[in-house]
Each structure stands twice: as C-alpha cells, then as structure tokens.
Image: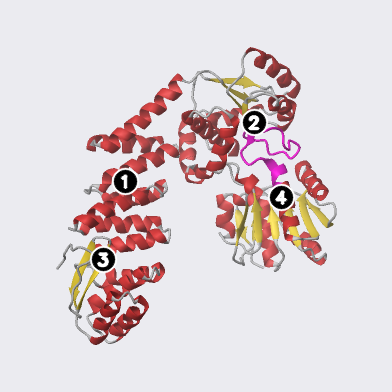
Amino acid sequence: MINFLKPFIFLIFTSCFIFYEKEIKIKEEGKGFYLEKGIEKLKEKKFKEALNFFNKAKENGEEPYLTQFYLFYTNYLLKDYENAIREGNRFLIFFPSGKLIDKVFYLMGICYEKEKFYVRAAGNFLNAFKKTEDDFIKKNSKKKFEEVIKKLQFQEIKSILEDAKETEVYEISLYYAFLNSLKEGKEVERDSFYLKLKEIGGKYFKEAQKILKKEREEIKEYKKNVLLLIPLSGEFGEYGREFLKGFEIIFKENKFIEIFDTRSDPVYLHDEIKKIFEKELPYIVIGPLSTKCALSVFPFFSKKEVIVISPTASDIRLGVIGDNIFAFNEGIYYEIKKISEFIIKNGYKKIGIIYAETKEEEIAKDVLIENLNKNDFFTISYSPDSSDFQKYIKKIKSYSPEIIVLLPSEEKDAISMISQMKFLKTMVPIISIHYLLRENVINILGEQLKNVYITGSYPFPALNFLIDEFNEKYSKIYSDQPNSVSMRGYETALILREIILYGINDFYRIRDFLNLKGFLKGLNDIYTWNEEIIKIYEFDGKEFKEVTR
C-alpha cells in the first residue's frame, strides 16, 4: 500500500518502515528477526547497522523481496552508489513485477546519474516514468530524464528513442536528438526529427522551429565578408581543390564567402592581400593552406584586427604570430613548447629523442633541444619508410634516458614505435606529438597505454561522430572517396558555420569559443593512459597488422 504522508508522521510498528526520497513514501510490512532489526536501524538513521542486518536477513532467507529492496535502498542512503546499482539490478532481475519497481527504477536513475553513467540514468528514469502511478515519481522522473538527456551524444539519444515512444518523454527525446543532429551537421536526421516534432506540436516543436528559422535567416542574410584563401592552381592546386570539396558540403554558393586563388605563390598572395585590405577588411579570413603562403601574410594579418582561421598552420616555423590568428591544433610549435614544459616540470635531465628524417621533425628536434639547452640529449633519426623500429629503440634504451620523446612523421610511425617500445619492455615515460589522438590509433593500441603521454588534439573533436556521415555525403556528391584534405575542409566549414550562427565578431571571443569547444586543446593539455599493452603492430602500406614474434 502506498501513502503520501507529511515528513513528520511516523509508523509505530516495528515490522514496517516508511522510506522516503523527498515526497516518496512506502509502507511495507515484513517478518523476520534480522529484517525487522534492519528496519528499526533505518528509522534511527543508523544505515551501516541496518545494512548488516539486511545482509543477515538475506542469508537467512527472510522475505527475499523486501530484503533485496532494503539492501538496495540502504546502499543508496549510504551514498554507496556502486553497490546500490548492483543490488538494484538484482532486485530488477529477481522481482521484475514487484510493486516497488517504479521506485527502484527512479532511485537507480539517480545512482547512475551520480556515477556519471548518463545513458543508463536516462533509461531508468524512462522506465520509472512508464511504470509508475505515483504523481511525484512521474513528474520528477520526467524532469530528471530531461536533465540527463542533455548530456548525451546523438547516438546515445537515438538508442533511447524507441523505448520512449508512446510516452510524454518521446517529445523530449526527439527535441534533443534534433539539437544534437543540428550540432553535428546531420542534416537528414535533423529534418526527420523536426518533422516528427511537427506532428506532435507543442513547445518543443516551437523551439525547434525558432532554431531552424534563425539558422536559415542568418546564413541567408550574411554579408560577403568571409575571405577563403585557397590554392586552386600552382604547386598546391590539387590540395586546394580537394579542400574546397569538403568545405562546400556545408557552404555551397554562399554569396558572403569570397574564394581567392593564392596560386600557391607567397609573393603574389602578399601583394594582392594588401590591395584587398585597402578596399575592404574581411570579417574572417580562412587560410592560407600552405606554410609558405602563411609565412608571407601572417605578419601582415597580425597587425590587422581581422580573425584568421588557419586549418593547416601546423608547421613549427610559424610559431606565435598574433592573438587574432588561430590554428586548429595551434601547430607543432605549441606542442614542442608543451613537451618542454612537461620535461622541466618533472625534472627529467637525460632525454632520448627519436625523430623522422623530414624537415619539419628535424626543426622540431632542434627547437626542443634549444628550449632545454641545459639537459643531456641523445638523438636518433629514422627514415619515414621504416616499419621495424627496434634497432632505434634499443639504441635509445642503451643510453638509459629518463624520458623518450617521439617526433614521428606519420600516424603509422607512432603506432609502430610505441607498440614496439612496449614489446621491448620500455619502462620510462614516452611522450609524442599529436598523431596518436586520432580515434583509429586509439582503437589499434588500446584506450589505455601505460606511461605514454600525447600532446595535441585532433581538430573538431565532435567529428569522431561525423566521419561516417561525412564519407557518405562526400561519396554521394562526388562519386568518389574523400581524403584527409577534404575532411579538413569539412571541419573548417563546420567551425565557420558555428562562429557565424553565434554572431561572434571579435578575436578574443573567438579564442574563448574555440577553447570551449575543444579546438585548441593541443595548447592546453597533455593526454595520458594507464594500462600496459602486449601487442605489436606494423604498417604494410595498406593496413596495420599485428606482428607475432
């Protein structure tokens, strides 16, 4: 029997107990020495003693249904959410038709939320909403469901939609699925969720309608003040054309974007940019896409109050130019600076460096040594064509460094080197530049790598969820498979669209915006994982293969 009583009313029976979470109250009678003792201790708020009695009640087979419930609830009161979840799941397995199940689902939702398992929290609040006849639980499980679903990613919300059908929270689920599909650029799904909201009507449809109207009007009415500096001819013409393909998936024939062919010529670009800026100051400059061209105009841009977003300014020679110039991962210069700070902070003196025989990595090595000129170095270079790095690793190990710095030319080098270092039981910390943060590398090496530190961030972190959709869109439009350059164009367009929609118009706010979104993580963070790996991988030119030795 369920009663809704004022908090100061108590039962006088020793064989029953009022349990409440705010206004939730349950009166249940039970028989058994240990069960009754446990209920007594609960009334006295002696939760640990109560838990001991309930465990004994379970051992003695006293009222299994109530005993299991009170084991769950007492752990909840103790804020031992991990054990509460375990006991709650046992209750749901053994007593799926119990009359307390709506209360268990509701409190399990709170436990999962506290433990930051938001998908499971949403599922439990949904089940509580569907199964209860308690007005308080119905109202609050709906409220908690909406609080939790805001924290979910697009795919996570999709996994809940089917269960939410035929309920009042289905509309909430559709709305947040709509918001996430809009955020992640999933136009087909966005329109689908919008139409479903339209069928239902109500406040969530009106909110979605406002958002779409604002987006369409702002992009349509935007002035022609975005300048895209891109090589469509010359040495990097093919690169620029591929970048433009990805970019135009988001911005196709928009009049406010002016495309300027840099001709891959830094001198020509420098002279023409000065002429353009004499006539009109663009709101945002995108590019240029080559280091030589960037070096020719970045000093000029740094003197102007114009926002510059450089999708490819990773060359270490660019360094720090100005507060108004942004690179997605801030370039290898920043990563070397961060590695230097890490080494100094941790007091490492003997440093082993393995670097690729490429111009950029050689410069990175020299800058690192210059930053740490009081340290003891041992350096080894390798050919980018190498796949077996064990001879280099053995040489580094013979030097007994306190830390090893990797400056790989490609992602495959980093994978092979770190896996082979682990195979050779290298125990010292390993720190590498950004390549390892790419999702497929983490999948290959395992999410947790002991004593491995990574600088940098893969641009536009949310894109991990968008890669498949981008590939599908690109293939449909161009009847071909995309490459990393077209992907970068797509990323750039997504960032530009966000900036335009938010109406951000000064570079200080742009920096705050990009930092908030995670685009500049390489400047701020070093990533690390904490578990050993035992597999070793090599790249055969087409794919990564595990090597058995």
User: Which circle's residue, 4 or 3, is located before the other in the chain?
Assistant: 3
**Mark 4–mark 1 CB contact (< 8 Å):** no
Disc 4 residue type (three-letter): Pro
In the picture of the structure, the residue carrying the numbered disc 2 is: 324
- Tell me which segment is drawn in magenta: 310-336
Disc 1 residue type (three-letter): Ser
For residue 156, above or below residue 230: below
39 or 267, nearer to the observer: 39
User: Which circle's residue, 3 or 1, is located before the other in the chain?
Assistant: 3
Marks 1 and 2, Cα distance to the nearest angstrom?
Answer: 39 Å
Image depth: mark 2 or mark 4 in front: 2
User: Which circle's residue, 3 or 2, is located before the other in the chain?
Assistant: 3
Marks 4 and 1, Cα distance to the nearest angstrom?
Answer: 44 Å
Marks 2 and 4, Cα distance to the nearest angstrom?
Answer: 29 Å
Task: Judge the density around disc 1: few (<14), some (14-19), many (≥20) Cα neighbours within 10 Å.
Answer: many
Disc 3 residue type (three-letter): Tyr
Marks 3 and 1, Cα distance to the nearest angstrom?
Answer: 29 Å
Dot 3: what SS?
A: strand
Q: Where residue 320 sits in the image (x, y, percent)?
A: 72, 37
For residue 387, above or below residue 58: above
In the picture of the structure, the residue carrying the numbered disc 4 is: 408
Quarter holding residue 25:
bottom left
Which residue occupies the extreme front position in the image? 8
In the picture of the structure, the residue carrying the numbered disc 3 is: 20
Q: Is residue 375 left or right of residue 447?
A: right
